[in-house]
Image (cartoon, rainbow, N blue to C red):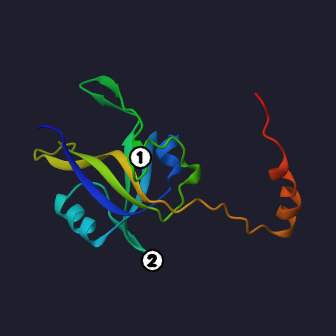
Amino acid sequence: MAKKYVYFKGKGSWFQHLFNLDQEYSKWHVTLHLTPESLEEFRALQVKTHLKKDDDGYYVKLSRPSSRVYSGKLTPFAPPQVFDKDGMPLTDSARIGNGSDITVKCELYQYTPPGGKARANAIRLESVRIDNLIPYEPNRDYTDEQAKAAAGLTDQPAPLF
């Protein structure tokens, strides 16, 4: 099967794991709250990625492993590529806030489930485009104790290494 790609749109969150490998799962990932159109497309694919629902609607956690074993051989994967709305590469999640509108490109592939005879569909995160950037705003709702502890730290120059 030749590589086939599918695209989904919606609101993104957890952008830090697009740039920094989630060590617990050895994956890069992003959470996507799907638009109604993308939700229909996602459901039609009948992929193994679980669809979940919260107060903001339906969402999926789209991921890409750091490596996989194929025919007994370890195959590494590069991190997903992230682009701004003009197609320029982004290299840091620090300025991407939750709720940014994104388009996600995923590779659609088939696999044979353990013990199964029929092939099934799965998707793997390939790249992300930030269509409408919501700037990241750090939570500054400090308790009085935290405010005292943090006072002056942001005014200090960064260390030179």
Circle 1: is it few (<14), some (14-19), or many (20+) Cα within 10 Å?
some
Q: Secondary structure at mark 1?
A: strand
Badge 2 marks a residue whose secondary structure is loop
Q: Quadrant of residue 1?
A: top left
Q: Amino acid at mark 2?
A: Asp
Task: Tell me the amino acid under the disc marked 1.
Answer: Phe
**x and y percentages locating residue 14 in the rendered image:** 50, 55
- Judging depth in this view, the residue of 35 and 52 nearest the camera is 35
67 sits left or right of 118 in the view: right
Per the model, the C-alpha gap separating discs 1 and 2 is 28 Å
| Residue at left offset 87%, top offset 57% | 149
In this rendering, position of residue 125 left or right of residue 142: left
First along the sequence among labels 1 and 2: 2
Check contact, mark 1 vs mark 2: CB within 8 A. Answer: no
Residue 139 image label: none
Q: Nearer the viewer, residue 32 or 68?
A: 32
- Answer left or right for 57 relative to 109: right
Q: Residues within 10 Å of mark 2 (few under 14, many from 20)?
A: few
Disc 1 target residue: 83
For the point 68% across and 64% down, the residue is: 139
Residue ID at (30%, 55%): 49
Between disc 1 and disc 2, the foreground one is 1
